[in-house]
Amino acid sequence: MAMIETRQVDGDEDGMRVDRWFKTHYPGVGFGQLQKLLRTGQVRVDGGRVKPSSRLETGQTIRIPPMAANAPSAPVVQGGPSREGRAGLEPYLLHEDADVLVFNKPAGLAVQGGPGLTRHVDGLLEGWRDRKGQKPRLVHRLDRDTSGVLLVAKTRKAAADLAGSFRSRTTRKLYWALVKGIPKPREGRISTYLAKDGPREAERMVIVRHGEPDAVHAVTHYAVVEQAGQNVCWLVMRPVTGRTHQLRAHAAHIGHPIVGDPKYFDIENWDLPGGIQNKLHLHAHRLVIPHPSSGGLLDVSAPLSAHMQQSWNLYGFDPERAFEVENEAAVLLNAKAG
């Protein structure tokens, strides 16, 4: 005889819609079937009737009738994460707790898949599924050739909280870049409108006027840390908005493109200094963001990629100097989009 089941709402499912919960746990139950089960009261939450759009709360009990209980349920991964996925990312792990993973993404590794891409962070995260089969979630991204801090949420709730922090701009993202020349002023704010231009495989961001089709506002704050003569300098850059290629397009816009940038470095009669590799010199050095559960700040820094460390060694740049600039430069501390 078919039995009625009851299941309790986990902490990670707090705030989840009823229809989303069923899609996660009982993918074999179609939306029309679920509507009928809810309408007739066969599915109940804490003994009461609910709608597909009703939000669940931690600890609530969901009544599952036999028809739904016998439908195919979501697979459970046994034995924890696979070794393959862990091996691909574990060497780059900077921080892990119950809510988040932080990696130092290497240059050249894409965050998500695309045409011709078979290896990327999102795919490698398959190997980090927990025992319930939940896969860690990306909450932001870095360009393929940009190295540095990449934050990943381990739970649905953490992902929602972190995404909210990015949307409300309560995060502090600091990038290191090697650029041509020395910007004037040495500390400043770049505010433009950007739009995508060109086919997808060669897409780049261009400066446009406010009101033009697809124009989005982009704001970046920067400060010079150290310079090597008048040829190149080390910038700390803080994006206030998060547009595609924002830092790369903005650096080029002020006449100081990032060294090794294949899309935006178009200065004629400028030779790459000896000992510098022709690779993008842009690194997501530090991320400060409210932690999704502790109530404090998560503050994580990532060491430079190998080719950038080689350049820093060549010029004798002192990494400790950056922390002084990051923590003292008003333009980086008080960055606003307006």
Image (cartoon, rainbow, N blue to C red):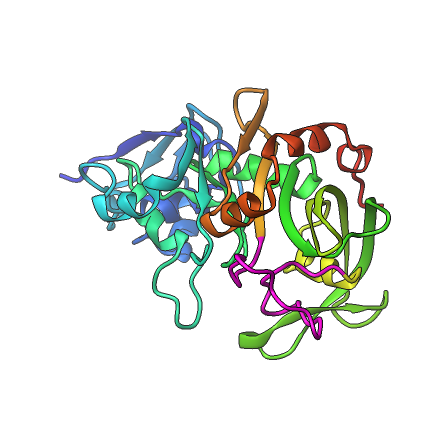
Image quarter hosting the C terminus? top right
Instruction: Examine the rendered structure and indicate whether residue 161 appears above or below residue 205.
Output: above
**In this rendering, position of residue 239 left or right of residue 71:** right
Identify whether 207 is placed above or below 170: below
The spot of residue 91 in percent (x, y) is 34, 40
Question: What's the residue at 73%, 50% (across, down)?
Answer: 229
Residue farthest along the left direction in this orientation:
1
Q: Does the image show residue 47? A: no
- In the image, residue 326 lies at what x, y percent? 70, 33
Q: Kindly indicate the quadrant of the structure image that contains residue 199.
A: bottom right
Q: Quadrant of the N terminus?
A: top left
> Magenta stretch: residue 238 in it?
no
In which image quadrant can residue 46 be found? top left
Return the residue nearer the eye: 138 or 56.
138
Q: Quadrant of residue 7?
A: top left
The mark total stands at 0
- Magenta span: predominant SS is loop
- Residue in the image at 71% along x and 56% along y: 231
- Residue 93 shows up from this direction: yes
Query: Which stretch appears magenta?
Result: 256-281
Give how far across and how far down residue 270 sits, in percent. 68, 69
30, above or below 21, in the image: below
Residue 255 image position (x, y, % from top left): 78, 62
Is 263 covered by the magenta stretch? yes
**Towards the viewer: 216 or 298:** 298
Measuring 22% from the left and 44% from the top, which residue is drawn there?
82
